[in-house]
Image (cartoon, rainbow, N blue to C red):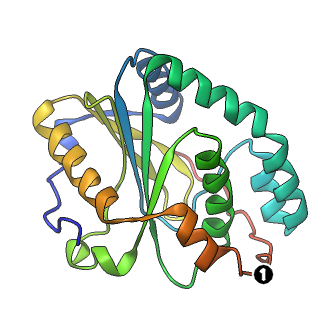
Amino acid sequence: MPDQNVPALTPESGERLVSKDYKRDFRERQALIRGGASWKLERRQYFEEQNDPSRDALTRGDWQEVLRLFAADRDIVLARAREDRSRGHAFYRVRIVEYPITPYVQWELHWLKQDVELGASRVRIVTADHVADAEKNHQLPEIVILDGRTLYHVLYTDNGQPMGSIRFTDPQRVHPWERYITSLYEAGEDIASYFAREIAPLPAPPPVPSPVPQPE
């Protein structure tokens, strides 16, 4: 079982970044990593992905186009994997999954499976029932940790549109969350076996209408 003791994360102890500043800061810090590991915790079951043709195809309900676009991205994913290996950087992701599986999660797990197969990341699945005790008061946040040094609490509107992040660099904030996400990863199931059992048998998902954009 994963650790049920969720670390504290108070917004006032971090720095608020709007989306463009978050993306720039993330890219700059990630590019500096040498011989380190990064971690991502994904909890929401729906996100609005921006400027993503495969996500647009999901919105239209064109599942064959989704799969075609994923296949067309293989060289890009392989290049990313080579770049990470050259820097000694490993990226670990924990994906929380609820049932019934949403079209978004079905779409994302197809993409993540390819990402893992091509060596660009390591992904394990934790079902929501395994974090139920940890979520008695609040749902787990969306977290990214770069090289054990920088933690981003990634923010979204209620309908899944990105709103930037809160950045934390205090080791007393970052390290407990890195340990917590590591415990989830260790308790999780490898995406390959989970995908074969739970995702591969699913029919193509229905169209997913996009919500009206909201300001940050």
Q: 73 above or below 155?
A: above
Nearer to us in this view, 138 or 54: 54
Q: Is residue 38 shown left or right of residue 62? A: left
Residue 52: image x %, image y %?
75, 45
Question: Is residue 65 depicted above or below 52 in this figure?
Answer: below
Position of 55 with respect to 47 (left or right) is right
18 displayed left or right of 6? right
Write down the residue under mark 1.
Answer: 203
| In this view, 121 is above or below 98 | above
Left or right relative to 73: residue 10 = left
Give the farthest residue toward the bottom: 100
Crowd tier of the residue under label 1, counting other residues whose Cα lies within 10 Å: few below 14, some 14–19, many 20 or above: few
Residue at horizontal 43%, vertical 34%? 90
Is residue 193 visible to the viewer in this orientation of the structure? Answer: yes
**Residue at the (56%, 47%) spot, across then down:** 215
**Quadrant of image for the N terminus:** bottom left
